[in-house]
Amino acid sequence: MYDYKGLNEECGLFGIWNHNEAAHLTYMGLQSLQHRGQEGAGIVASNNEELVGERGLGLLTEAISEQSLESLKSFGHAIGHVRYATSGNKGIENIQPFLYHFYDMSVAVCHNGNLINAQSLRQELEEQGSIFHSSSDTEVIMHLIRKSRAATFEEALKESLRTIKGGFTFALLTKDALYGAVDPNAIRPLVIGQLQTGEYVLASETCAIDVLGGEFVRDIHAGEYVVINDEGVRVESYTHETTTAISAMEYIYFARPDSTIAGKNVHAVRKITGKRLAQESPAAHADMVIGVPNSSLSAATGYAEELNLPYEMGLVKNQYIARTFIQPTQALREQGVRVKLSAVKDIVHGKNIVLVDDSIVRGTTCKRIVRLLKDAGANEVHVRIASPEFMFPSFYGIDVSTTAELISAHKSPDEIKTYIGAESLAYLSVDGLIESIGIDEEEPYSGLCVESFTGDYPAGLYDYEARFNANLSERQQAFLTSNKQYFDRKGNQYV
Ligand code: AMP
């Protein structure tokens, strides 16, 4: 059966045109995007005649061997993908880029995000005779492109991009060009860069351009696509029905701190969220502030700076353990085997601590960390979250797509405080978040997607709508009724 959950969640994309080390540079670009996905990786390269690919499971270094990379050495163009782990569907067949060989052309495609009308499109396509190979949404766009009667590949791509809905970015490679595309709300990011030697690259985040010593050229805005070929780079729009709503979760959690999204550096934004959180919810009588490595460290420094409190390293993360690491068994966990995160006992013992984390989703991580600190002798633990209550599922590609799994959909901050065993708990306000990110009011950067905090879905819900409405919790319903101010954006369901 078709999995209800989107299958192409948060991922990293990279592409490069016309460089004699295209595959190697793609590998390096992907390495800097590894935080966006550790389940699998792939590279497809082209030499103006044929397209060939290598892909595998796990981290990039596990997925693509030196030998595989060597086999792509003579190819001048490439795209690559790192894939985020989602439940189920962990097979090699879902690792991208997908490479299609048709009688008249070959196309490689990779995708970041989630298509919210993929299920209904797939049903329509199957009724018309299409046969799907994988359970991935990405196949849908390829079917749409091939079914189109448009005269050129570019026109067919535009038509298909207008048909799909959700939060997405794509990178596609043919023997003639490298293409990139961004959804009509720019929920997921994609940028263009230029290397010192003049070649153009595409990447999910600017950090991938920086590691190659390149220059940022521009963000690809809502509803735009880019064509990079031997003639240079050309940015066009496939739709003008756009409302910019960049995913706030990119700033809060996903992106690397050295990346810049829509002109805002991620570390700087996180630091401001920490400062704002300190203004909104100062913790009295604290001895120190500590952050949860890695994504919360920036916010924790902002919190500490604002209140003139010492910022300390109270937790240490083992940097060599990937998401796919072998979990200790329940029995070993009960014995206290904690391989991923450790408390620095000499620092936290007997102290009143402010623990800053970027978000609480299911609540299990925070509960575990509070326990870790208390076991290490911490006196009081005051938890401060540098984002608002994560109350609504996200269907735009961050792998949190059911209400049931969200602790804030069911419990109040006070109840969660008790659940995680903290002395106090406070969240950043929605306005605090929006103002901290501070996206310029001027077009094209007009807004943010804060759907998980407000239930405002700028790209709509489509295939997910019935289930979303049927599963609304009491807390969610109460929030939607009392926070109408968040529901005036074009395309949302509740105006
Ligand atoms: P939990 O509350 O146990 O679900 O874990 C929340 C922690 O996971 C946060 O502190 C984040 O650092 C991280 N996180 C936030 N959003 C996501 C996401 N969509 N997928 C995976 N981890 C996330």
Image: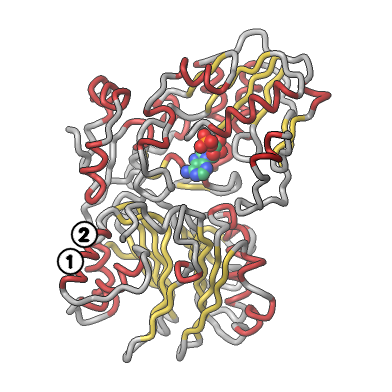
Ligand 1 within 8 Å, label 2 CB: no
Question: In the image, residue 318 lies at what x, y percent?
Answer: 73, 44
Label 1, residues with CA under 10 Å away: few <14, some 14-19, many ≥20? few
Between residue 326 and residue 201, name the one nearer to us.
326
Image vertical order of residue 411 relative to residue 177, above or below: above
Whether residue 298 is visible to the viewer of this picture, yes or no, is yes
Question: In the image, residue 164 lies at what x, y percent?
Answer: 26, 60
Left/right of residue 388 with respect to residue 423 in the rendered view: left
Marks 1 and 2, how far apart in space? 6 Å
Identify which amino acid the numbered label 1 is placed on: Glu
State the residue lying farthest toward the right: 346
Left/right of residue 469 with respect to residue 444 in the rendered view: left
Residue tagged 1: 124
* Kind of element beneath mark 2: helix
> Which residue occupies 48% across, 30% down?
387
* Kind of element beneath mark 1: helix
Q: Quadrant of the C terminus?
A: top left
> Which residue occupies 40% across, 83% down?
176
Q: Quadrant of the N terminus?
A: bottom left
Asked if disc 1 and disc 2 are in contact, CB closer than 8 Å, the reply is yes
Residue tagged 2: 120
Whether residue 250 is visible to the viewer of this picture, yes or no, is no
Between residue 129 and residue 66, name the one nearer to us.
129
